[in-house]
Amino acid sequence: MSQQPQVHGVAGLKKHDIKVSGIVFMLYCLVAAGAFGIEEMIPEAGAGMTIVLLVAFPIIWAYPISNLVAECGSVLPSEGGVYVWVKEAFGEFWGFQAGWWGTVSTYITNGVYVALVAGYVSQMIPMSEAAIHVLKIGMILIFTIINLMGLKEVGKVSTVLSIMIVLAFALVAIVGFLNWNTNPMEPMMPEGYNFIDSLGGGICICVWMYCGYECISNMAGEVKNPQVIPKGLMIAMPLVALTYVLPTLAGLATLPAGSWENWATDGGFTSETMGYATVLTQNLGQAWGYVFLVIAIISQCAIFNTYLASGSRGFFVLADDNLCPKFLVKVSRKRGVPYVGIISLAIVTLILAQSDFTTLVSMEVVFMLALYIILPLAVIKLRKKLPVEERKKRGLFVMPGGNAGLIFYAGFPIVIAIVALLINGTDYLVMGLIATASGIVAYIIFKKIYGGLSKNEPERFPMNQKTKLAMGDTVRIGVYLIAAGAMAFFGQFWLHWYEIDYGEWGPGDYDMLGNVIPQVLEALKWGGLAAIIIGILVMVIGYKKDRPIKEEHVDIDALMDKYLNEEKHDDIFGDL
């Protein structure tokens, strides 16, 4: 009896009937899984500034991003999410960059959550190095098995873990408010800090805390009715904000005045630090510290579980489009999951879980900031290719507010991402430039080896036989060089003032780059200027010999139907 051939790629994925609640809780795990991480923000930004940022960022960051993701996910609900949207807006070169930035950031940092679990468990139970290593392997193995079972199982686990986390932080908020004894907004900023200092101390952590809404779109191709994703986004966003603001406000209000300086991620688990667990131990007894330590472990497990699902789909979709090694497109016949992608991410996680993650976490943030710059631009372009009127006829989600709303939703993420890159210092800008440049190198290598989209759709994505890249890629590389060069050239003026003239920092005051920042800034200035000039020359040459192919007509119905299910959904925001 002959076996059925194994189905590869997106076509082989199994569709799951996932409800809105499942999407909400998966999103909650991807973005938050509790308020852990904010503890580091409080002593850096100040108690008052932390609360202000936590309240402001849902409005100017999370809400716009949620709407951007909801609109794109509604019209093009495909496995791969942002990669597909940017690809359809700007072509495979920029699509690959978006897919690369989002996926590599997950591969880099997924080990952090495993390491944090090991650290939390070690606080309860003294463990040898060998035992810690076994614990890490066990955690990775358990959640890899869950992911191999399918997206629906991932959603079920996320739901259970999320409910436990939400209840724990709700208890912190209630206990804190019932025992209010100090002004949680004092001080607004640490002593000796001004607004810029305080903002710089908190903005990047706040950006990181509200990241992850776009990750759910990576799995849209496995959801029977992907129109539940926009609904889930609109519910999850305020849930995350409340989880952050209320327990933090209550914690600062109930703990002694001045204790804000001692907040840390292990707060309440050691005698020297403060945190959310301290709220319970101070008012309910020391045993609650262990309860909250268990919640901290559950939180990291919840994040790891969902990011293993989301991150494993990134290279899988790129491989399906001939932009990554082809072995990554394998899908299990029985479960319909990209098992090679899941296992490969699990293996990389185990390796990185043994490392020091300070630099890796910082690099994840700059990858994501690059992604949040290109996503709004893709939404603007897709509005032109796929008019709003056509979407409304199909009952799809469209961001409210017309053109003014589009400016708000697209403008704030771009501005905040650029500010976050600059206000966190020279090291962040340098890492950002290196991180984005890695995508250019990877694209050229993979495109030449595997052929890219010209293999599947040669008419839409023709190849330049001389360069072995897509038609117009020379121009696109020139655009990247100009943009990166401008960021380096103009950014160094700000950084010189911020870190040297205004900051008056002396030897030993700098971050990862040490005392060579003046020399690095000089290199950014001349290197940025050179990149701009080279980029202009490359564009001029490209327009003469490698002009991008423009689509004379976009068949809206064909493009939408390529990603939408056959059934139409007249009202995706009906009864929940």
Image: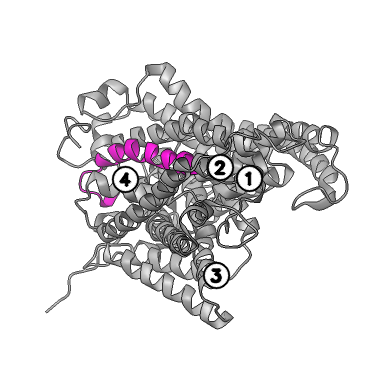
Spatial CA distance of label 3 from label 2 is 24 Å
| Residue linked to disc 3 | 123
Spatial CA distance of label 1 from label 2 is 7 Å
Q: Which secondary structure, mark 1?
A: helix
User: What segment is highlighted magenta in the picture?
Assistant: 220-247
Vertical comparison of 107 with 125: above or below? above
Earlier residue among tags 4 and 1: 4
Earlier residue among tags 4 and 3: 4
Q: Could you say which disc has been placed on residue 252 in the image?
A: 2
Which residue is found at the position 63% from the left and 31% from the top?
540
Q: Could you say which disc has been placed on residue 24 in the image?
A: 4
- Rendering quarter of residue 499: top right
The label nearer to you, 1 versus 3, is: 1
| Residue linked to disc 1 | 260
Earlier residue among tags 1 and 2: 2
Vertical comparison of 241 with 262: above or below? above
125 on left or right of 167: right
Magenta stretch: helix, strand or loop mostly: helix
- Rendering quarter of residue 406: top left
400 on left or right of 475: left
The label nearer to you, 3 versus 2, is: 2
Spatial CA distance of label 4 from label 1 is 32 Å
